[in-house]
Image (tube, rainbow, N blue to C red):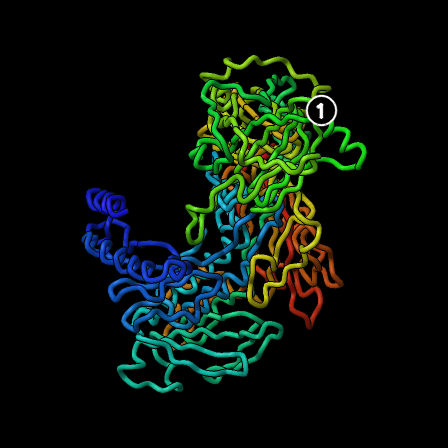
Amino acid sequence: MQRFVKKIVDLMREEMLFSWQGGPIIMLQIENEYGNMESSYGQRGKDYVKWAANMALGLGAGVPWVMCKQTDAPENIIDACNGYYCDGFKPNSNNKPILWTENWDGWYTTWGGRLPHRPAEDLAFAVARFYQRGGSFMNYYMYFGGTNFGRTSGGPFYVTSYDYDAPLDEYGLLSQPKWGHLKDLHAAIKLCEPALVAADSAQYIKLGPKQEAHVYHANFLSEGLNLTQFGSQNGCSAFLANIDERNEASVTFLGQSYTLPPWSVSILPDCRNTVFNTAKVSAQTSIKSAVSLPHSQDVTIPQTISAHSEVSFVSKSWMTVKEPISLWSENNFTIQGILEHLNVTKDSSDYLWYLTRIYVSDDDISFWEENSVSPAVKIDSMRDVLRVFINGQLTGSVIGRWVKVVQPVQFQSGYNDLMFLSQTVGLQNYGAFLEKDGAGFRGQIKLTGFKNGDIDLSKLSWTYQIGLKGEYQKIYSIEENEKAEWTNLTPTAVPSTFTWYKAYFDAPDSADPVALDLGSMGKGQAWVNGEHIGRYWTRVAPKGGCRPCDYRGAYNSDKCATNCGNPTQTWYHVPRSWLQESNNLLVIFEETGGNPFEISVKLHSAGVVCAQVSESHYPPIQKWSPSDFVDGKTSMNDMTPEMHLQCEDGHIISSIEFASYGSPQGSCQNFSRGRCHAPKSLSLVSETCRGRNSCSLGISNAVFGGDPCRGIVKTLAVQARCSPSSNIGFAEL
């Protein structure tokens, strides 16, 4: 470990990457959440923390070192917080700054699980509360989602996508409104910078039973200013919080009244004017989808981007070859007993075959028939996937993490081949003694139901075969795929288990990110031009557990889950850099049976964008600057809120599907008119936005030709469709 850490630090220094060298690195981290498992190692764990700290400090990096979730971090190491909320965190010394190294803006997704989603309002609330209560540094985990290409997903049972509900998704697209709302949040915090960096601490003011203010003032400590002076001095910023989970609150702060939505923080850069509230989302909502797009010669205007457009299947011509359910290599070996999976494979493959022979006498057959019993494989514990084969035929499968196995089997008289296929679906990647977690089987493993008693399988000789023949031959690669004896696939030959498929496809004509839709397949792995895009598994999430999401109150990963009753993942990211213009090789290994003829290439984009902004929202945060706040007064002339819409790069707003200024109801993709509606809404928004990449519109009666209904707060709701600009028959304005 020391050699590795030293190598990294030396490399950073050689490349002039540390901040004192003019580079971007301001901090380094040693270990990660070791405090969660330190107690499992007793005194050795405590000694290790000290050793790791001293080792890191001795490398002379010249920047601070941190340990997250390490309450016993030594004096010269900063202990930091990881979690959904860190506003109450205090380091183990008053001499250390308050750091939040992992702000979890989503959570991990498992095969067969729901999709976790953390609302933008709650995430912004957590960040604002952190800085309100003295936080110095905050880092999102993750800000940019990713993809577990190859077999890199952990867990076990984590899906190939590492999107994590991040502000930037795994394809590089903005996740709205999360990205836009956080952008506005940090712009608001930036306006408070003079006071935040000048004040040693905030002045706490109780505003109500669950309402409070924290005031930062550059001169508060040095000059002993009192509360009545805050509003008349420069360099004053305030955060007003309502931590009530249900009710909004009206509070008085420095003689002025403020309305605070539930579970929200208002930011006042000048201790007077609210520029942002965490519960008021002005950012647009983007509905991303994976849609088919025919090649350029087939493109028409603009329905090609429609989610209902004709599906573009990868190919009508597929080839296939079966994976042998037998020993296929001279590299197999035989030994007595059951070996631990990972000690054999060294993680070179997910797959490990175990083969032994079982003799069944005529007396055994008679015993089963006379007593109406069946033999069974019994295993105390196994992970992750077990396939049981008798004489080359699949008898049963078991899925789980260290679960008990009772699998009935059927033998014929004489010698029978008993074969186990043990599979890993990601390795243990967290916790104490994770290197001992292993894979395969634990405890007793036996055959029951025989006339002369159970058979202890651990005492038999077993032949071991690592991996798949297709893996070994690398038939997924451009260079080696012809090694296999491919034959043409007919639609009547599917579905088929333990089968390789290949086809060729052309890259779609677009700059949009590319995904493969493998929803027609079962479980397996996929390669494009020899690049391993990951495991796939069309495992379905439970039907229950998805409820309307309420941002209010403490978040947990089950609170705002989506995608109930659907496969956890069907779209798989294929980086554009892996594709060529035509003749891209797609190779699939399918374990459980699927239909490759229905695999399609999709473009991942935000086809629908929506906005919902009311008169009670604040002016765009980008219009404010520190110079706007002088002596408690604002120099902003126009305080009108605005609606903003923007398509992805290379796309323009091709149509406005809904627009209503007044009292619209519902949410994106489910808007409807309310009793109050300005007749010019649709025409005005269309005229302003159609044909443009982005547009904005003021939220005021004057813009919409007068007040459509007096006495209520008006809202503008808009739903627009974005289409590739090259496919639209009018020029971008």
Q: Is residue 695 above or below residue 188?
A: above
Q: Amino acid at mark 1?
A: Gln
Name the quadrant containing residue 498: top right
- Residue bearing mark 1: 412
Q: How many marks?
A: 1
Q: Give coordinates of residue 462: x percent, y percent.
A: 52, 28
Q: Is residue 652 above or below residue 589?
A: below
What residue do we see at 68% from left, 46% from top? 657
Q: Is residue 364 left or right of residue 647?
A: right
Q: Categorize mark 1 by other alpha carbons within 10 Å: few (<14), some (14-19), many (20+).
A: some
What residue do we see at 68% from left, 22% from top? 414
Q: Is residue 273 left or right of residue 678?
A: left
Name the quadrant containing residue 678: bottom right
Q: Give coordinates of residue 285: x percent, y percent.
A: 58, 52
Q: Give coordinates of residue 239: x percent, y percent.
A: 45, 73
- Which of the pair 660/429 is nearer the observer? 429
Q: Give coordinates of residue 84: x percent, y percent.
A: 49, 62
Secondary element at image label 1: loop
Name the quadrant containing residue 419: top right
